């Protein structure tokens, strides 16, 4: 089985789908690994490092020739995959809802597209979960980006000239990214609070030393979504939450929003009026900006100033820590393929539970139920 690792072509993408570590592990399974020249440079991996790990390094055509598995961070253009073996797997983050035309093109090309972001959130798939591994570092980076834009210190400092107050940080959405944002802001010495529509996160917030901000005694909360994601809230809860959050946001120095709903636009958490209630010099970091944004006025790829409040909307935040996120992403890919590796066939054979969840195309057809409903 030949495994090909491609150089990413999406604008601003700095990650790579394999490291020296995972290449050695694939070769130990009996696979042949080919890497496109320059694939790892933006993630601090030289071509010579890949060669030393046992991979062949060459141009795109030689890298793809006869490949049975193509690894990527973001889905490659189907038209650029000439030379792969019939029925080859494309294993990457494929954005199936946002790039449906590309999914159809994979099917038309006879490729089997496997979307790693569709990995089910079950215990045995935790080590394969790219959303968790990448969100973890996104939450960390969000706090660093906020600190960079804030222009003041995070911790309380007592000096002979007087006391510097601790920054007040409010995290909205307590999934993997939100929890890491809380932990990072606390490490930097901030006074941290957080909220989420899922009541189960209250204890998690408290365990990290932050203050939970929750609506109490309101019926109709529907925040416990499937697969560990937040779901929709009732109208009564939305109204109560808006009132509570508005009063809290006005007192904050930094707000970090992380709320996403798979396959749907990001929920709006902060209105223009709430932005206007914050003091000049405050900062909001919107980690959901590429899916429509949690914050009114956020612009993907920009830091905008609205009445003295900076709204940070960086694209592809995981790529801003490319070396570490590549290491985690590549381990997710290896763990996925290794879990199903058949030594007799020298190739992976997926089971139904995980295979049916991540498989988008097969036999020239789009087969994933989430894309057919």
Image: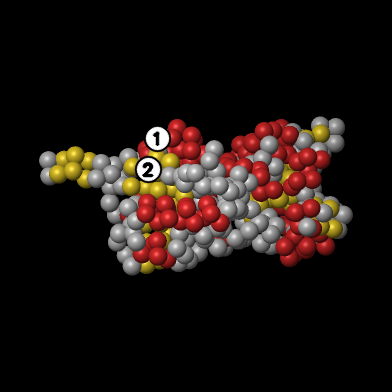
Residue 104: give its label.
none
Quarter of the picture holding the C terminus: bottom right
Judge by depth and name the residue closer to the eye, 45 or 315.
315
Residue in the image at 71% along x and 50% along y: 115
Residue 195 higher or lower than 265, as above or below: above
Residue 160 appears in the figure: yes
Residue 63, percent across and down?
72, 52
Is 298 displayed left or right of 331 in the figure?
left
Residue 174, percent across and down?
50, 44
Residue 273 higher or lower than 88, as above or below: below
- Count of labels shown? 2
Residue in the image at 21% along x and 45% along y: 164
Element under disc 1: loop
Q: Which residue is mark 2?
A: 192
Judge by depth and name the residue closer to the eye, 226 or 54.
226
Is 279 displayed left or right of 194 in the figure?
left
The image quarter containing residue 27 is top right
Judge by depth and name the residue closer to the eye, 162 or 302.
162
Is 171 displayed left or right of 223 in the figure?
left
Q: Are marks 1 and 2 in contact (CB under 8 Å)?
A: yes
Alpha carbon separation for disc pair 1 and 2: 8 Å
Quarter of the picture holding the N terminus: top right
Residue in the image at 66% along x and 40% along y: 121
Is 349 displayed left or right of 177 in the figure?
right
Q: Which residue is mark 1?
A: 209
Residue 322, percent across and down?
52, 49
Residue 48 appears in the figure: no
Q: Earlier in the sequence, mark 1 or mark 2?
A: 2
Element under disc 2: strand
Residue in the image at 81% along x and 38% along y: 351
Query: How would you rate the neighbour count of disc 1 (Cα within 10 Å): few for under 14, some for 14-19, many for 20 or more?
Result: some
Query: How would you rate the neighbour count of disc 2 (Cα within 10 Å): few for under 14, some for 14-19, many for 20 or more?
Result: many
């Amino acid at each position: 089985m030949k495994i090909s690792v491609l150089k990413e072509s999406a604008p601003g993408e700095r990650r790579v789908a394999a490291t020296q570590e995972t290449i050695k592990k694939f070769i130990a399974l009996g696979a042949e690994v080919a890497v496109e020249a320059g694939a790892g440079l933006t993630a601090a991996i030289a071509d010579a490092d890949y060669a030393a790990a046992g991979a062949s390094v060459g141009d795109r055509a030689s890298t793809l020739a006869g490949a049975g598995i193509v690894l990527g961070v973001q889905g490659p253009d189907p038209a650029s995959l000439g030379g792969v073996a019939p029925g080859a797997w494309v294993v990457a983050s494929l954005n199936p809802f946002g790039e449906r035309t590309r999914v159809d093109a994979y099917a038309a090309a006879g490729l089997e597209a496997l979307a790693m972001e569709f990995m089910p959130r079950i215990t045995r798939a935790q080590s394969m979960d790219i959303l968790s591994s990448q969100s973890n570092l996104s939450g960390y980076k969000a706090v660093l980006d906020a600190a960079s834009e804030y222009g003041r210190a995070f911790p309380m400092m007592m000096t002979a000239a007087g006391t510097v107050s601790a920054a007040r940080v409010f995290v909205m959405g307590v999934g993997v990214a939100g929890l890491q944002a809380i932990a990072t802001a606390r490490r930097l010495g901030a006074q941290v609070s957080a909220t989420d529509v899922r009541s189960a996160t209250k204890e998690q917030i408290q365990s990290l030393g932050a203050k939970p901000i929750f609506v109490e005694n309101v019926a109709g909360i529907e925040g416990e979504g499937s697969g560990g994601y937040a779901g929709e809230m009732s109208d009564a809860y939305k109204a109560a939450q808006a009132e509570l959050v508005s009063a809290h946001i006005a007192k904050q120095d930094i707000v970090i929003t992380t709320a996403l709903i798979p396959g749907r636009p990001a929920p709006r958490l902060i209105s223009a009026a709430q932005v206007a209630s914050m003091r000049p010099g405050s900062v909001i970091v919107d980690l959901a900006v590429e899916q429509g944004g949690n914050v009114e006025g956020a612009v993907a790829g920009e830091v905008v100033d609205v009445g003295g409040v900076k709204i940070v909307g960086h694209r592809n935040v995981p790529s801003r820590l490319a070396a570490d996120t590549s290491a985690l992403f590549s381990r997710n890919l290896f763990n996925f393929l290794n879990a199903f590796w058949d030594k007799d066939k020298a190739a992976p054979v997926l089971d139904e539970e995980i295979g049916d969840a991540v498989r988008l195309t097969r036999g020239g057809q789009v087969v994933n139920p989430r894309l057919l409903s």
